[in-house]
Amino acid sequence: MNKREFLRTTLLSSIALTFLPKINSKAFGLSAIPSDVFKFEQSPLEYAFDALEPYIDAKTMEIHYTKHHAAYTNNLNSLLKDNHIKESNIENILSNISKYPTGIRNNGGGYYNHELFWKIIKPGGSTTPYGELLQAIEKNFGSFESFKEQFTQKAMSVFGSGWTWLIKTDNGLSITNTANQDCPIMDVVSERGRPIIMIDVWEHAYYLKYQNRRKDYIDAFWNILNWDVAFANYAAV
Ligand code: MN3
């Protein structure tokens, strides 16, 4: 900036300041400044990174939560800002995702899916399914053991990156896969429903500990599955 530009900038700034309305900074605190776009935040993890050992290792959990999930969240916020989208309900966005840019589909799904995933697993798991959810599982899949087998087979069949879900549909329970970060509430997937149980089968979810052994990771998943949350997901729909 040369001297003339400097003077011009300074002069314009002074004029601008003169015409700015006087703001009482104490009465008008930072939090009161209207935010144009809602910002999504990662829920705090309810257990330590190493709490799921030996089923999911601490390093995987740390990278998965602080890098992968954080990146989806930050990217989602940036994309909403850039596209001037003010919707603050992630389920409203995802259930109408065909109307949004692809980046919001990928990162909005990434944000939401991991929010669900951190809650469906917990240290030590919680016994076995019970109540109406167990009855529905037995009705739809024959038995709990048969359900586990079918869910495992479905998760093994994901080609590339994706998720496997137990969902509640109008016709009962169903096991379905989604590619990338799609999820069953999106209006673009082949089979829609409300998520009850979900497993992330992207390699970043298990590769450090299990490498190519996805089956071992899925088998381990049953030991940390939080059936109380699964039951709550089921009862909520
Ligand atoms: Mn993931």
Image (tube, grey):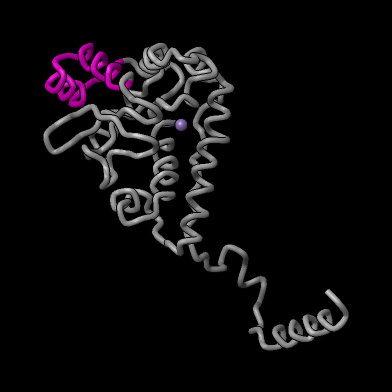
Q: Quadrant of the N terminus?
A: bottom right
In-front residue for pair 232/223: 223
Q: 135 above or below 82?
A: above
The percent coordinates of residue 219 (x first, y second) are 37, 12
Q: Total number of numbered labels?
A: 0
Q: Position of residue 121 (x, y in %)?
A: 41, 25
Find residue 23 and report its horizontal and vertical position in percent.
65, 78
Q: Nearer the viewer, residue 187 or 47?
A: 187
Whether residue 162 sits left or right of residue 28 in the image: it is: left
Seen at 52% across and 37% down, the residue is 44
| Picture residue at 33% right of the left edge, 18% below the top | 156
Judging depth in this view, the residue of 20 and 67 nearest the camera is: 67
Where residue 127 sits: x, y (%)? 33, 15
In the displayed structure, would residue 231 be above or below residue 223? Answer: below
Is residue 135 in the magenta section? yes
| Residue bounds of the magenta highlight | 128-155
The reply, left or right, for residue 24 in relation to residue 62 is right
Q: Quadrant of the C terminus?
A: top left
Task: Give the main secondary structure of the magenta stretch.
Answer: helix
User: Residue at image x 23%, y 11%?
Assistant: 145
In the image as oriented, which residue stretches furthest toward the right?
A: 3
* Left or right of 89 on screen, residue 72: right
Task: Determine whether 105 is above or below 199 in the image.
Answer: below
Residue found at x 32% / y 51%: 97
Residue in the foreground of this view, choosing between 60 and 116 = 60
Q: Is residue 232 left or right of residue 112?
A: left
